[in-house]
Amino acid sequence: MNQKSSVHCRICDTPIEAFMSFGRMPIANGFLTAEEVSEEYFFELAPAFCGNCGMFQLIEQPQPDKMFHGHYAFYSSTSRFMQLHFENFANSVMKDVLAGRADPFVVELGSNDGIMLRHFNDRGIRHLGIEPSVNVADVARRHGIHTISSFFSPALAEDIVAEHGKADAILAANVMCHIADLRGIAAGVQRLLKPDGVLIFEDPYLGDMIAKTSYDQIYDEHVFIFSASSVKRAFDPYDLELADVMPQITHGGSMRYLLAPKGSRPASPRVHAQLEKERSQGLQEAETYLRFRQNCEASRARLMQTLEELRAQDKRVVGYGATSKSTTVTNYCGVTPAHVEFISDTTPIKQGKLSPGAHIPVRPYIEFTRQYPDYALLFAWNHAAEIRDKEKAFVAAGGKWIVYVPEVKVFS
Ligand code: JHZ
Ligand code: ZN
């Protein structure tokens, strides 16, 4: 890439440069057939940190319609734990924000298959999901959840206000960090939100990613990895103030942010404490990212050493969970079908396809249980508790797990 010097921060326009590159990368959820391989799309996955506003971001992101479309492969409801998580999220919004309000209206950006909105629907609360990926939106619609298939924008915000009025709560989970035009989203939120409304969203958290070297959170969809300080700064020009932060254990460490029109509610002491914690963790310092890069390189070397040793011993290794994250791991580290025989996944749309870039076959879960491999490479490491609980028979049969976050480890 020789255009680096002309790249500017997506939030504050300061010139930025990549501090490392994960190399040529396909679309993380771009599972494909053998016939599609010759036309596979690649871009350079290179993150940068803006020293001015503190936003961790990708230098380049593919066009949104390359990532979110009528055959988007990630269905939110594939994990029992995540179903429970979003039920709790919805309940907390009803209790802490909507209680006592007359005929409240909730909007969710990127509502996927309705994993969260269904709880509002069940209680007869007015709601609207905005989901550009039509196939997942159709699942929500089949459950009676009001959903429009569109990308959110200031213009769409105006249309929603005209039709439904302003929102008491705007929600988003694992969505906000996907949208390159975050400034457009913030402007849309500003128009859509009531003066006493709140914006609540959660995404994988930068502090956890740095602490755990979970570099696989970096892929095309995640154009930003947020921290409390970068979120505070990004929404400030839109009159939205960071009023609370709530750490979550989901996706290997996430943060839920609550923002409200300036002056409309007091900030929780947790905000100040989190900002302090980020300062002491060095999240604002360039050196932190150079160390992160070294940690990624060391993690890659150790994972490949492990996989090469197992290959030399003729051990069977199968991937567990064809996650978006696994696309970064396989392509950055050089994991091939010679290392990993196939990846087991419960999502029908991924089965029978090849994994993006590395072209490891994705097979139905039943194939994992039919003949247990010697080792399972846990690409869905964020669901480890749920999966280990479910796979006791694999371990009892002598199977071992390989994980790489926070470090490469083999265990049973
Ligand atoms: P999982 C998703 O990332 C997508 P991914 C998205 N881009 C995002 O932002 C992040 O979340 C935060 C399968 N599975 O949840 C189902 C099993 O096979 O780690 C899924 O394909 N068996 C919106 O894709 C995958 O693994 C199981 O028992 O990295 C898990 O994907 C379980 C629990 C899951 O998210
Ligand atoms: Zn910036």
Image: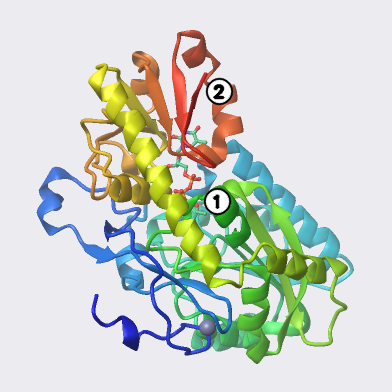
Percent x, y for residue 391?
A: 52, 20
Quarter of the figure that contains the N terminus = bottom left
| 152 sits left or right of 297 in the view | right
412 shown above or below 200: above
Q: Nearer the viewer, residue 334 or 371?
A: 334
Number of other residues with Cα within 10 Å of mark 1, as a class: few under 14, some 14 to 19, many 20 or more: few
- Where is residue 114? Give x, y as percent: 56, 55
**Residue 319 sits in quarter:** top left
- Type of the residue with mark 1: His
Crowd band around label 2 with a 10 angstrom C-alpha radius: few (<14), some (14–19), many (20+): few
The residue depicted at 47 percent of the width and 55 percent of the height is 217
Residue, x 32% and y 30% (percent of image)? 307
**Which residue is tagged 1?**
143
Residue ID at (36%, 55%):
72
Q: Earlier in the sequence, mark 1 or mark 2?
A: 1
In what element is the residue under mark 2?
helix
* Residue corresponding to mark 2: 390
Q: Contact (CB < 8 A) between labels 1 and 2?
A: no
